[in-house]
Image (spheres, rainbow, N blue to C red):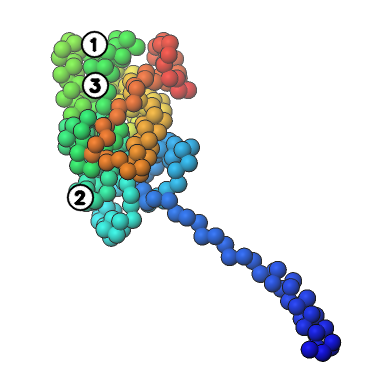
Amino acid sequence: MGVALSRRLALMATLALPLAMSVPAPKAVAQEGPGVLMVLWRGITEPEQAFKKRLEEKGVKVTYKEITGDQDRAKMAEAMRNVEPDIAAGKFKVAYSFGSTATQVAQSVIAERVPIVFNIVFDPVGVKLVDSLQKPGKNTTGVTNGVTIDAQFDAFQKLTPIKKLVVLFNAREPNSNIIEKEVTTWAAKNKVEVVSHRVAPGDTSLDTFLADVKDGKIAGDALYAGADSFLGSKAADIQAAVGDKIKLLGGTQTFVLRGWLAAFTPTVQDMGATAADQVVRVLNGEKAGDLPVILPTPKMIVSQAAADKHGVKVPAGAVVEK
């Protein structure tokens, strides 16, 4: 090779070097974590926020697919049918479901192909989601907020005496109907007068009820609404309408976060975190149907503002919301 040719080749290599250096290296493809189907009744709520936070804290990377029923069973069923191809293709390693109705619909479509971890279900045995709390079966387990009515009202009676109780329940929600019957049984045993009022989404029954409370046609020492998605979604409206007229007692922390006086229940943080722990166990290979349903430790949760308004002393050890 001649000297001139060698010089030309060296010059070409030198000129090509900056171009080669300027070409970016191929980007690494981000690895997707296991698929988690989020079957939601009314979108992301406080328990789901706690659920996702717990998985992040544990360093568990997952890929979420969220569907919601917007508190409508038919819409929930349609949303589940729309993800049927992904279920059949095995894209989900586990499903998280909120509440009894969403879990019932999820079970009917999934048919045990994907393990289900439910959350915020008051009576999972009563609504036939599991065979028993200790041995759920059906490729399903979860987290319950089913503090017994006796335990709830023992705590409420220590907070504020109740001789006449107004019970508000959602006639279309299985849990809500179960709770109303249990409250009536508790009241009979404890010589408390109960006045029950049924309401339902999509009509004027709740507005009529609130108007009657405002006008004094309905009165009592306290008003109680148990764990129910519809009533939970209306908790702020109920508080704004009649919170100054009657002491409001709820079945979940959601009510207190919306200004109600008190609830004796697991915190939403504990509910979401415990559901995440159950999901991790399933992802690690344990069978959902063999994992006992968990009730996190219930706590007295009190709104300081509502307590001040009604002259109620906040007990020591309570979780206090502003």
> Along the polypeptide, which appears first: circle 2 or circle 3?
2
Q: Identify whether 216 is placed above or below 268.
A: above
- Residue 45 appearing in the image: no
Residue type beneath disc 1:
Lys
Q: What separation in Å lies between label 2 and label 3 (alpha carbons)? A: 30 Å
Q: Dot 3, how many residues are within 10 Å of its Cα: few (below 14), some (14-19), or many (20+)?
A: some
Report the front residue among 162 and 64: 64
Q: Position of residue 288 (x, y in %)?
A: 27, 40
**What residue does disc 2 label?**
111
Report the front residue among 244 and 139: 139
Task: Give residue 148's mark.
Answer: 3
Q: Residue at x 35, y 38 (%)?
A: 281
Q: Dot 2, how many residues are within 10 Å of its Cα: few (below 14), some (14-19), or many (20+)?
A: few
Residues under numbered marks 1 and 2 in contact, where contact means CB atoms less than 8 Å apart:
no
Q: Is residue 237 left or right of residue 141?
A: right
Question: What is the total number of numbered labels drawn onto the structure image?
Answer: 3
Q: Nearer the viewer, mark 1 or mark 2?
A: 2
Q: Identify whether 152 is placed above or below 288.
A: above
Task: Give residue 115's mark.
Answer: none
Residues under numbered marks 1 and 3 in contact, where contact means CB atoms less than 8 Å apart:
no
Residue type beneath disc 2:
Ala
> Along the polypeptide, which appears first: circle 1 or circle 3?
3
* Helix, strand or loop status at disc 2: loop
Residue type beneath disc 3:
Thr
- Residue 319 appearing in the image: yes
Residue pushed farthest front? 1
Q: Position of residue 239 (x, y in %)?
A: 37, 27
